[in-house]
Image: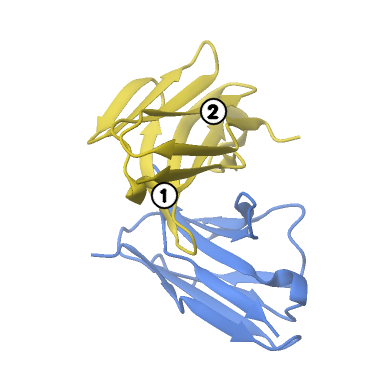
Amino acid sequence: DAMVIQNPRYQVTQFGKPVTLSCSQTLNHNVMYWYQQKSSQAPKLLFHYYDKDFNNEADTPDNFQSRRPNTSFCFLDIRSPGLGDAAMYLCATSIQGITEAFFGQGTRLTVV
Amino acid sequence: KNEVEQSPQNLTAQEGEFITINCSYSVGISALHWLQQHPGGGIVSLFMLSSGKKKHGRLIATINIQEKHSSLHITASHPRDSAVYICAVRFNTNAGKSTFGDGTTLTVKP
């Protein structure tokens, strides 16, 4: 059974139109991460939640926001997607300092 | 400059060959992950290591803390092993976040 679920698997959005990607987990892990991975590149951490504490990476654009209403769900909001935001977005969970990270299947975002 | 270096960047092998992928890092770590990503797919965690050696099926991962080096081995490689293999390191100074290597693209030909 899938433990980290990302929806949708594929998302097409218009240039400048807000879009939300979702991630849910059944593991009850306290840490959730959002990564951006562009073609042929390593995943890049955008931000992570440690419980409800939000931790933004210094170079994450303001265009990217996140919400974590409860332990199980985390959302990535892109307020005004640009063509350069087309990428695979990966969600991962872990227990801080204890377990390996579990990744979702990713959402591939296309901006047209 | 990426603090996690993987080699080789690309690797092509014949089915049945023994594969080794290497990962080196610059400073002390709390954990090292080996991840597998198929084209267009999500990431699967293969191993998490902090010391020694782990084995799962045809996959073996080793780590040498003193040398700051880890290897992922695949025995009796198969075309379905074709994927990108990524080393991700959790540095002691950056607890909770992983730094990723650039990945090794493995192609196993039948």
> Residue A54 appears in which quarter of the rendering?
bottom right
Quadrant for the C terminus of chain A in the image: bottom right
- Observer-nearest residue: A12 or A2? A12
Q: Which chain carries label 1?
A: A
Q: Is residue A32 above or below residue B66?
A: below
Q: Is residue B48 above or below residue A87?
A: above
Instruction: Check the rendered structure and report the hue given to chain B.
Output: yellow
Q: Could you give the CA–CA distance between mark 1 and mark 2, rounded to whole angstroms?
A: 22 Å
Crowd around label 2: few <14 · some 14–19 · many ≥20 (10 Å): many
> Residue B33 appears in which quarter of the rendering?
top left
Identify the residue at horizontal 49%, vertical 39% (top origin).
B12
- Observer-nearest residue: B101 or A81? B101
Q: Do labels 1 and 2 share a chain?
A: no
Q: Which chain is blue?
A: A
Crowd around label 1: few <14 · some 14–19 · many ≥20 (10 Å): many
Residue on which disc 2 sits: B23
Tally of numbered tags = 2
The answer to whether B16 appears left or right of B38 in the picture is left
Identify the residue at horizontal 33%, vertical 58% (top origin).
A28
Q: Which x, y percent locates residue A23?
A: 45, 70
Amino acid at circle 2: Cys
> Taking the image as drawn, is residue B76 in sight?
yes
Given this view, does label 1 or label 2 mark the residue nearer the observer?
2
